[in-house]
Image: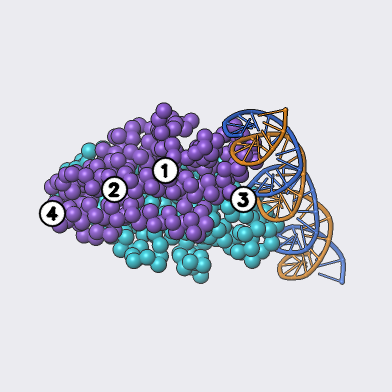
Chain colours: A cyan, B purple, C blue, D orange
Amino acid sequence: MSTAEETAGGEVAPWGEVTPDAARRLLMAAVEAFAERGYHATTTRDIAGRAGMSPAALYIHYKTKEELLHRISRIGHEKAVDILRTAARREGTPAERLADAVSSFVRWHAGGRTTARVVQYELDSLGPEARAEILALRRQCDAEVRGIIEDGIAAGEFDVLDVKGTTLAVLSLCIDVARWFNIEGPWTPDEVGALYADLVLRMVGAGK
Amino acid sequence: MSTAEETAGGEVAPWGEVTPDAARRLLMAAVEAFAERGYHATTTRDIAGRAGMSPAALYIHYKTKEELLHRISRIGHEKAVDILRTAARREGTPAERLADAVSSFVRWHAGGRTTARVVQYELDSLGPEARAEILALRRQCDAEVRGIIEDGIAAGEFDVLDVKGTTLAVLSLCIDVARWFNIEGPWTPDEVGALYADLVLRMVGAGK
DNA sequence: GGCCACGCTAAGCGGTTGCTCACCTTCGGC
DNA sequence: GCCGAAGGTGAGCAACCGCTTAGCGTGGCC
């Protein structure tokens, strides 16, 4: 049995760690609903209905609607950190590692855009303490990318004017993929990943 | 008397075309509320309250809450098209025109992030026919940027692998500024505009 | 077989939502 | 001084919200 589940859109999402089964079904239904309509416009009745359950069933597994968003957001951000960390710490030149990080990160945002949209754009719907926890994970994402860029500068491979600003721009570019990417559009997630890796290497002045 | 109004955040927004006065105050209050909480989480009582009016006053000037968002979105997108068109059609080399377009567009998203956030991120809250109208304006934005890039390629100044993809990435980078920019952060809108203009020129392979 | 913990449902609670309606002012034109 | 239009208000409607509670079926354990 796989630890990956498929949403109705055919995406692969790592919700295997969520148990029991009914809790996972509710969480996957919430991801779809939040991505389609936004957190505030989604009703608990809608989530429960998509999971084939009554509204009350939701409250057996989750204390509030916000806890659902919190769980989704934390798991998603942990995955994001994992993707970037894996690319940052692999073998290879800074350019290879940066290209790997960008293409993997973009593929995740494009292929799992339903999840990514919730993870990246519903942060403000969280309460203060939950948001603070997620922001710490975002800073880890930033640190991993900045580390690669600093390595490239130290190795004399990159030419960057503003490390902080360039790091932010690289992450911003990747994250915004979740907003515009459409699975029925002209590109596959792999193609966007490759295109963006090339654009980012140009941004840091690599491979001249 | 100026045609520009200031929101509570000190931003300059061109709502001068909205009359009468009460309708403009309601619209500016709606922009603030939508940017802070999102369209669906904002109540008509909140909008009216910010404008110093009773809830019922809103319906004298606007038929529904959605009409408010529609008006905001259309005026904002018209301004966006105007900014890009002005930069695209000025005198100068393609590199100068692209740098101008990016820095102006970024300055608008950073300086007027309250408005820009509503304009760029609440599109899905619109009904089908209103959304279709706005999407036509977005295609005009895309066409202006693509035009500059194509001019640069034709002049032999730019080196671009995928014109469509690069155009999308440039716009995506600029638009996402509205998501992360914070007026209390380390950068001014001008600084981000200059940084991003440099990054975009690198993306299109100019100035090597 | 008796029992009870578990997962779930039907019904519904108090509160809030977008929006309406009856009515009240203010004010320029005559 | 009268009037009607324009712009506003207080009260409130029907619908819907997140969430709770009482009770039901079922499967494992002794």
Closer to the camera in the image, B151 or B201: B151
Calculate the distance from the C-alpha at mark 4 to the C-alpha at mark 3: 56 Å
Reading the image, the residue beneath label 4 is B155
Residue A165 screen position, x and y as percent: 30, 39
Chain bearing mark 2: B
Task: Say whether mark 1 and mark 4 are on the same chain.
Answer: yes
Say left or right for A193 vs B115: left
Chain bearing mark 3: A
Question: Is label 4 in a helix, a strand or a loop?
Answer: loop
Kindly indicate whether the residue at mark 1 contacts the one at mark 4 (C-beta within 8 angstroms): no
Closer to the camera in the image, A141 or B75: B75
Reading the image, the residue beneath label 1 is B116
Calculate the distance from the C-alpha at mark 4 to the C-alpha at mark 1: 33 Å
Calculate the distance from the C-alpha at mark 2 to the C-alpha at mark 1: 18 Å
Please name the amino acid that badge 4 sits on. Ala
Marks 1, 3: nearer the viewer: 1
Reading the image, the residue beneath label 2 is B85
Calculate the distance from the C-alpha at mark 2 to the C-alpha at mark 3: 44 Å
Marks 2, 3: nearer the viewer: 2
Q: Earlier in the sequence, mark 4 or mark 2?
A: 2
Number of numbered discs overlaid on the protein picture = 4
